[in-house]
Image (cartoon, rainbow, N blue to C red):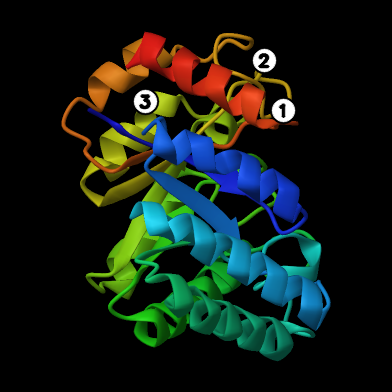
Amino acid sequence: MIKKCFTINQNRTTEEFQSYHQLFEKNLFQAIEIFYPYDKSIEQMETYEKNVLDLMKYNIEVVLHLPHGVKNDLCNEETYDVVLNRFKKAIDFSKKFNVNKLTLHLGYVTKNKKSREFLKQKSIETVRILANYAYPANIMIENMPDIHEMGYSPEEIRNIIDTVNLPNVKFILDFGHANVSEFPIESYIDLLKDKLFHLHIHDNDGTRDQHKPLGTGNIPFKKLFKKLNDYNELFCMEILYESVDNLIQYENDLKQYV
């Protein structure tokens, strides 16, 4: 049986968290991917933490998505020290949930004045710092949908991972991001399969990152999942959802493809 996962961002309420219990009671999902709620009040952060811990009674795996977006740009020299410190705090936060997998966005290229090669070397240095800080937990570099972001091409990600050369630096394949890029999704699998440690699963029509349900875009999931027949880590649904009923439907959809 495949291991299924879904994301729970820091804006979800206690009532919503309580509705998720049935998903684990029925063994529909076996894991969750959470976020570091650095942008919330202390009370809100404590509530989020409590709600996650409450779900852990089902013996589920917890993945943590490190801070991302423009405010968390690891390629921006002006804010680098502040952002790096925030990432370290996120790693500290993850230890409360026995997290072994940390999802990483490397940052933005054209928002900075340095060359892509310079920023790649800076990313290598940053990944090494984070991997050493997080050890033995794994840092997973996610492929990004836009050429203006670091970690765009399969070759760029491969080069960063190989140059860092640490055992706890891995790759997370985001199907939606890959489908928007100029590269075939297969190329990410072919070049990085030996480092693949996590999946973000959602659909789109190839024009932009839409986080749609499977089958509502043009990603050939059946063909791609066949290339991953020896993959035994989590299948994480990163589809936009409003309620637990959506998650039940998405879990059922996934079974039609795997």
* Residue shown at the point (58%, 37%) measured from the top left: 238
Q: Is residue 104 visible in this depiction of the protein?
A: no
Query: Where is residue 205, by image quadrant?
Result: top right
Name the kind of residue labelled 1 in the image.
Gln
Label 1 crowd bin: few (<14), some (14–19), many (20+), radius 10 Å: some
Q: Is residue 80 visible in this depiction of the protein?
A: yes
- Secondary structure of residue under mark 2: loop
Expressed as whole percent of the image width and height from the top left, the position of residue 148 reads 70, 50
Query: Where is residue 34, by image quadrant?
Result: bottom right
Label 2 crowd bin: few (<14), some (14–19), many (20+), radius 10 Å: some
Which residue does the numbered mark 3 point to in the structure image?
A: 186
What label sits on residue 205 in the rendered view?
A: 2
Q: Nearer the viewer, residue 121 or 41?
A: 41
* Residue shown at the point (49%, 44%) measured from the top left: 153
Tell me the distance, in whole angstroms, between the alpha carbons under discs 3 and 2: 17 Å
What label sits on residue 210 in the rendered view?
A: 1
Expressed as whole percent of the image width and height from the top left, the position of residue 176 reads 58, 30
Callout 1–callout 2 Cβ contact below 8 Å: yes
Report whether 213 appears left or right of 44: left
Name the kind of residue labelled 3 in the image.
Glu
Callout 3–callout 2 Cβ contact below 8 Å: no
Query: Where is residue 215, by image quadrant?
Result: top right
Tell me the distance, in whole angstroms, between the alpha carbons under discs 1 and 2: 8 Å
Discs 3/2, front: 2
* Residue shown at the point (79%, 85%) measured from the top left: 78
Expressed as whole percent of the image width and height from the top left, the position of residue 240 reads 70, 32
User: Considering only vertical position in the picture, is 44 above or below 26?
Assistant: below
Chain-order first, disc 3 or disc 1: 3
* Residue shown at the point (64%, 49%) measured from the top left: 17
